[in-house]
């Protein structure tokens, strides 16, 4: 893993861009970092997008950290083809994450990104609700893992694309980092409360249903996001 990480900077060299790439009609090359932050943090759609990505972090980090233990608690962690059900679950999430991310990037170029994000978050809530209410078996774990894999990082492409649409690419790395910071706060709380409430109550049920409610909340707040450049770009 260390060797692969060392390869990343080298493999990224051919992908180098510059701040003038992308939608130049949206960019303001004279805008300072402070101005860019002030503009973004005062923009309703950006704040909604940032809040929604918090939910993404909460959901995926909770599942990553606690799903294997949850499967074991159900008594379902049997061996299938030399791997436990929990190992299959995490592996399938990773595998289908590839297809979901690619599909998200393609669809995001053709359809409304805010509405697509709403569908992705409500899809997570529906899938989780079905998984919790229907009989839980090794097969249901596998099916749920595949569905969640498709919905996993498929939120990333439209989220970052919306930041670029709104503010251009000049400060995309920084503004995307602000949105991702919210994601990481959600990740911390998903992992922490998953462990804490399981210790206190002996069950993950509260966190599962909290994730469902947060998914519905995220679907609602993404719907009114406006997929257009900020006003200063339109009048420049």
Image (tube, rainbow, N blue to C red):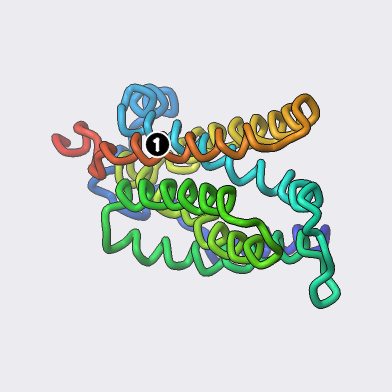
- Quarter where residue 3 is shown: bottom right
**73 lies left or right of 180:** right
Q: Nearer the viewer, residue 6 or 87?
A: 87
**Horizontal placement of 54 versus 203: left or right?**
left
Q: Is residue 183 above or below residue 136?
A: above
The answer to which of 12 and 198 lies nearer the viewer is: 198
Please state if 166 lies on the left or on the right of 144 as rendered.
left
Relative to 211, is 15 above or below? below
Residue 13 visible within the image: no
Residue 54 visible to an observer of this rendering: yes
Quadrant that contains the C terminus: top left
In the image, residue 109 lies at what x, y percent? 31, 62
Of all residues, the one furthest to the bottom in this rendering is 81
Residue 230, quarter of picture: top left
Q: How many numbered discs?
A: 1
In this rendering, the answer to whether 86 lies above or below 162 is below
Q: Residue at x 68, y 61 (%)?
A: 137
Which residue is farthest left? 235
The one nearer the camera, 83 or 182, is: 83
- Element under disc 1: helix
In the rendered image, residue 8, in percent from the top left (x then y), is placed at 68, 60
Task: Give the percent coordinates (x, y) of residue 7.
Answer: 73, 64
Which residue position is annotated with label 1?
49
The image shows residue 213 at horizontal and vertical percentages of 48, 35
Residue sitting at 62 percent across and 56 percent down?
Answer: 135
Residue count near mark 1 (Cα–Cα under 10 Å), binned few <14, some 14–19, many ≥20: many
Q: Residue at x 85, y 74 (%)?
A: 82
Closer to us: 182 or 55: 55
Q: Is residue 236 above or below residue 39?
A: below
Q: In the rendered view of the protein, which quadrant contains the N terminus?
A: bottom right
* Residue at the farthest front position: 135
Q: Is residue 191 left or right of residue 224?
A: right
């Amino acid at each position: 893993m260390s060797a692969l990480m060392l390869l990343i900077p080298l493999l990224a060299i051919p992908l180098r861009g510059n701040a003038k790439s992308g939608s130049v009609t949206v960019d303001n090359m004279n805008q300072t970092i402070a101005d860019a932050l002030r503009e973004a943090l005062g923009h309703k759609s950006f704040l909604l997008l940032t809040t929604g990505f918090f939910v993404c972090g909460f959901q995926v980090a909770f599942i990553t950290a606690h799903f294997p233990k949850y499967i074991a608690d159900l008594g379902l962690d049997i061996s299938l083809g030399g791997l436990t059900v929990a190992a299959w679950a995490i592996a399938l999430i990773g595998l289908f994450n590839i297809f979901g991310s690619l599909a998200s990037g393609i669809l995001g170029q053709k359809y409304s990104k805010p509405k697509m994000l709403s569908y992705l978050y409500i899809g997570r809530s529906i899938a989780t609700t079905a998984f919790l209410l229907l009989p839980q078996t090794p097969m249901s774990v596998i099916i749920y893992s595949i569905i969640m894999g498709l919905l996993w990082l498929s939120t990333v492409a439209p989220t970052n694309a919306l930041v670029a649409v709104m503010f251009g690419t000049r400060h995309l790395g920084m503004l995307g980092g602000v949105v991702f910071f919210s994601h990481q706060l959600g990740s911390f709380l998903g992992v922490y409360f998953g462990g804490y409430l399981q210790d206190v109550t002996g069950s993950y049920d509260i966190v599962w249903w909290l994730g469902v409610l947060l998914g519905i909340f995220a679907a609602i707040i993404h719907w009114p996001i406006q997929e257009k450049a900020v006003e200063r770009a339109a009048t420049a």
